[in-house]
């Protein structure tokens, strides 16, 4: 049995286009049978207990379940003998389905359609979420402009103020031209030392 809780207005419709009975390849239903998806969970199968009953010999008694959550529709296969398919691809456990998708339950070919209630419900949910945002919240474009620094022209993109101090220059070796000056200073020190040594020897 399906749950009785859920949206009162139908958001999606399952359209049964054809079923297979006996040995016939498929019987097209004219007009197609339409089932409105109103509850949070809707059972699909051959059993009379299912909300959507498909009189098809290749449909399991409890074949699948349509699950409606937050305006999104999902298909859950209930380990059916002939696995449920969406647009030709088998459904291992649960997949999200969209308007226009073709569902295959055994030999029953179905199609998902949306109603105007889908867009209206989604818009209402978005509006409700927006109304719960804290005051002042919004896009980055709504943030107040940052005041320019004292030396910056107004109306232009500015750098952070105050400006960051320049990094210290770490010299790992002598600067260009420094080795020559170093050698000259070394020679001058050697000459001065020799002169002092000669003077001391002469005075003795």
Image (cartoon, rainbow, N blue to C red):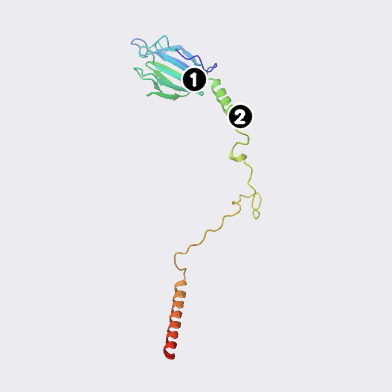
Residue drawn at the location 47% of the way across and 75% of the way down: 181
- In the figure, is residue 178 to the left or right of 125? left
Is the residue 160 above or below the residue 115 in the image?
Answer: below
The number of discs equals 2
Alpha carbons under labels 1 and 2: distance apart: 30 Å
- The N terminus lies in quadrant: top left
Q: Secondary structure at mark 1?
A: strand
Residue 34 placement (x, y as % from top left):
48, 14
Which mark, by number, is residue 63? none
Residue plotted at (44% across, 72% down) = 179
Residue 88 shows in the view: no
**Picture quadrant of residue 143:** top right
Going 45% across and 74% down the picture, which residue do you hit? 182
Residue 120: x percent and y percent?
57, 23
Given residues 179 and 64, the one toward you in this image is 179
* Percent of width and height locating residue 164: 57, 55
- Give the residue pinned by disc 1: 113
- 202 or 171: nearer the eye? 202
Q: Is 81 left, or right, of 32 in this rendering? A: left
Q: Which dot marks residue 131?
A: 2
| Contact flag, marks 1 and 2 (Cβ < 8 Å) | no
Residue 75 appears in view:
yes
> Split into 4 quadrants, where in the image is the C terminus?
bottom left
Q: For the residue labelled by badge 2, is the local secondary structure a helix, a strand or a loop?
A: helix
């Amino acid at each position: 049995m399906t749950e009785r809780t859920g949206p009162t207005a139908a958001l999606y419709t399952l359209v049964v286009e054809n079923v297979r009975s006996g040995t016939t390849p498929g019987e097209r239903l004219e007009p197609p049978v339409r089932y409105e998806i109103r509850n949070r969970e809707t059972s699909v199968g051959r059993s009379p207990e299912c909300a959507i009953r498909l009189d098809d010999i290749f449909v399991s008694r409890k074949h699948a379940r349509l699950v409606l959550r937050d305006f999104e529709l999902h298909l859950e296969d209930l380990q059916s003998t002939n696995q449920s398919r969406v647009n030709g691809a088998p459904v291992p456990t649960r997949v999200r389905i969209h308007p226009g998708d073709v569902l295959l339950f055994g030999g029953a070919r179905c199609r998902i359609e949306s109603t105007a209630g889908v867009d209206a419900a989604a818009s209402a949910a978005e509006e409700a979420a927006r109304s719960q945002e804290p005051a002042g919240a919004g896009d980055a474009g709504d943030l107040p402009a940052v005041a320019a620094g004292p030396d910056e022209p107004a109306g232009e993109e500015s750098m952070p103020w105050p400006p960051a101090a320049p990094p210290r220059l770490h010299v790992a070796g002598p600067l260009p031209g420094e080795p020559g000056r170093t050698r000259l200073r070394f020679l001058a020190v050697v000459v001065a030392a020799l002169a002092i040594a000669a003077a001391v020897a002469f005075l003795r």
